């Protein structure tokens, strides 16, 4: 059988140097040195506004009165610079700074983009906050924590109807509220349009010149699990270095101005640093996708991809799954999406092999070749780019090789190996959190990631690293047997595709391994209940029970011992909670938070005091 053909794509980092110490610690560095990069990200804005002033920087569809979307509104590079200068002057007039930053509560928007650029222009830090902390949360605890930590001088929301309640409950009376539209009863506010009417002065140029590589651009708060989120400091130098590392690992980024159709939230490092950053760094265009990988909004993503042909396409596995399914029958989508794209890229969770196969089948059918699927490993604290797979033949779990100038330290921790990072793209620390900083960096200044890795082949390090779960997630059974959570979780998700969203592994100090499953919306396809049926009713349907019984039996047959044999399983009808930190903005499940907040169910699952437990070869309801 001949090797599959891939659309041509050059790789920049293909080999590494590895030094091994007597204690088993390894240091890994790319053979290619890190090239020059700008002192600050605003240098790129100035460059593209001068060279390609009429090119679109950001576009978004107009919001219509009935809630639907209309034609695209475009913000060119020239318009973006003008807006940044005017708004920047208004921020200077108010005395805002890194200690009195701007909080942005809104989703991705043209106003959000302009405010971020304005803050960068004049050295005022900004913080895009997860919209869920304002619109989904019931107690606003995380939003209150962020406000206490940052002491903002201004809090911005484009839509008062969506964010007014949270702002009224959380924003101190002496902090200015900025709104795009609407009002908040009982609170005075400033209009975003008024800032755009400000006349800029030479003070903007002076403020710009005062910024440099160590200037704080933004704070990005990591999703809290058992504790409140931490504010990761992002500097100009860190962000620019990371973009240069991305370019050297993925030269395709500079072969033509990148075009992105992207929903990933800017309060998250993947959307806000990785994707917005590569757009600005290379003078590209980003089309804001108001769709999301959920049934109610996926139609908007498909509509956008039928109209705008991306050169690189980023998404999480659930989004790629929906696109793969749609491409089977949607000729316009398939034709447009595959016309110019040079690389797909996923992050956030494991991509199940059936999704991979489906994407490749549509690609080969339409263009006669496969499109490279890129992936790797990084963190909010690394900018986020860190490791990237240097070949087209990617398998689930592959991570690849480090970017130029980023040194990896592979440290044995128990039965696993933790990857740690050191380089110009690594954060200087967490804002106003000395204890977290002390705990997060080792004695050599390497950032502890908590991620476990293994070599694809220890004798051939240039083949790269593979993911091996999280250090803190692993545990021992009462028998002393060590359970490696990452690989087992990945196997359950892959075997249960496309009906398993995630699996939370249980069994700490127990006799057996258990699993609590969150299902995807497609689980409804397993039975013939109407769309109005609740998730609880769906999960109790005999056909659904039969499917998961067979899944568990298959997993049990493949197990090689008690450490990877799931002996009891339960389906979760209660969705993960944003307030409890069980789920992130991108839909990723936080194992530790679920285990902490559902401890009673975990104990009942293992002592048999709860009904609805599924065991291998058994037949019973599995609802909880």
Image (cartoon, rainbow, N blue to C red):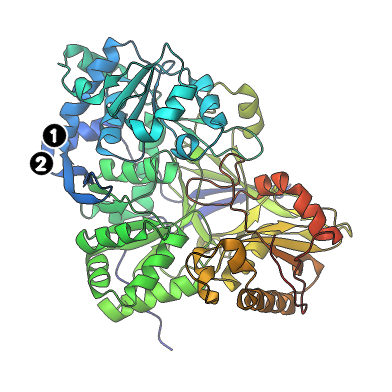
**Vertically, is 554 above or below 23?**
below
Q: Which residue is mark 1?
A: 78
Q: CA distance from mark 2 to mark 1?
A: 6 Å
For label 1, the SS is: helix
Residue 491 visible, this orientation: yes
For the residue pair 415 and 583, the one nearer the viewer reads as 583
Would you name the residue on which mark 2 appears?
54
Q: Are marks 2 and 1 in contact (CB under 8 Å)?
A: yes
223 and 548: which is toward the camera: 548
Decide: is 611 above or below 40.
below
Residue 110 placement (x, y as % from top left):
25, 37
The spot of residue 556 in percent (x, y) is: 74, 75
Residue at point 25%, 58% (across, down): 304
> Quarter of the image containing the C terminus?
bottom right
In the displayed structure, does residue 619 sit left or right of residue 14? right
> In the shown orientation, is residue 364 left or right of residue 376?
left
């Amino acid at each position: 059988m001949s090797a599959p053909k891939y659309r041509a794509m050059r790789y920049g980092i293909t080999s590494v140097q590895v030094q091994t110490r007597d204690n088993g610690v390894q240091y890994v560095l790319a053979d290619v040195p890190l090239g020059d990069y700008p002192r600050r990200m605003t240098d790129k804005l100035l460059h593209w506004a001068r060279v390609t002033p009429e090119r679109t920087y950001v576009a978004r569809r107009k919001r219509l009165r009935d809630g639907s979307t209309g034609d695209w509104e475009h913000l060119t590079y020239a318009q973006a610079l003008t807006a940044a200068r005017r708004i920047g002057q208004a921020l200077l007039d108010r005395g805002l700074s890194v200690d009195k930053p701007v909080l942005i509560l809104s989703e991705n928007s043209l106003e959000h983009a302009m405010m971020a650029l304005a803050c960068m222009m004049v050295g005022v830090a900004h913080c895009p906050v997860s919209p869920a902390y304002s619109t989904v949360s019931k107690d606003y605890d995380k939003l209150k924590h962020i406000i206490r930590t940052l002491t903002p001088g201004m809090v911005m929301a484009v839509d008062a109807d969506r964010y007014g309640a949270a702002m009224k409950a959380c924003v101190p009376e002496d902090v200015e509220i900025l709104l795009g539209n609407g009002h908040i009863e009982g609170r005075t506010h400033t209009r975003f349009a008024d800032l755009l009417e400000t006349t800029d002065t030479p003070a903007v140029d002076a403020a710009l010149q005062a910024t440099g590589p160590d200037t704080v651009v933004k704070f990005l708060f990591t999703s809290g699990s058992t504790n409140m989120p931490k504010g990761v400091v992002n500097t100009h130098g860190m962000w620019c270095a990371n973009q240069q590392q991305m370019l050297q690992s993925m030269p395709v980024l500079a072969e033509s101005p990148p075009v992105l159709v992207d929903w990933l939230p800017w309060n998250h490092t993947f959307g806000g640093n990785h994707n917005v950053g590569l757009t600005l760094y290379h003078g590209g265009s980003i089309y804001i996708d108001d769709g999301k990988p959920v049934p109610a909004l996926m139609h908007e993503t498909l509509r956008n991809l039928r109209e705008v042909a991306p050169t690189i396409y980023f998404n999480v596995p659930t989004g790629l799954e929906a696109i793969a399914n749609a491409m089977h029958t949607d000729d316009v989508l398939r034709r447009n999406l595959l016309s110019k794209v040079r690389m797909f890229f996923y992050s956030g969770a494991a991509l199940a092999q059936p999704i991979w196969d489906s994407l490749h089948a549509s690609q080969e059918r339409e263009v006669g070749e496969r499109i490279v699927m890129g992936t790797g490993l990084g963190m909010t604290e690394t900018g986020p780019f860190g490791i990237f797979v240097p070949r087209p033949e990617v398998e689930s779990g592959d991570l690849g090789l480090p970017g130029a100038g980023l040194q990896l330290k592979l440290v044995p921790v128990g039965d696993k190996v933790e990857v740690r990072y050191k380089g110009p793209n690594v954060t200087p620390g967490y804002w106003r959190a000395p204890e977290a900083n002390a705990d997060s960096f080792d004695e050599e200044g390497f950032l502890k990631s908590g991620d476990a890795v293994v070599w694809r082949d220890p004798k051939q390090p240039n083949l790269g690293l593979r993911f091996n779960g999280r250090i803190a997630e692993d545990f021992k059974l009462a028998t002393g047997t060590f359970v490696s959570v990452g690989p087992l979780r990945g196997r359950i998700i892959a075997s249960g595709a496309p009906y398993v969203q995630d699996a939370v592994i249980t069994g700490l100090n127990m006799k057996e391994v258990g699993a609590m499953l969150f299902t995807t919306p497609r689980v409804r396809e397993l039975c013939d209940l109407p769309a109005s049926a609740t998730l609880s009713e769906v999960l109790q349907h005999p056909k659904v029970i039969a499917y998961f019984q067979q899944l568990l039996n298959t997993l049990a047959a493949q197990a090689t011992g008690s450490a990877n044999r799931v002996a009891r399983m339960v389906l979760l009808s209660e969705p993960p909670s944003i307030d409890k930190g069980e789920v992130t903005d991108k839909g990723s499940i936080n194992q530790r938070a679920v285990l902490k907040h559902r401890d009673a169910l975990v104990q009942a699952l293992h002592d048999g005091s709860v009904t609805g437990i599924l065991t291998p070869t058994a037949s019973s309801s599995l609802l909880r």
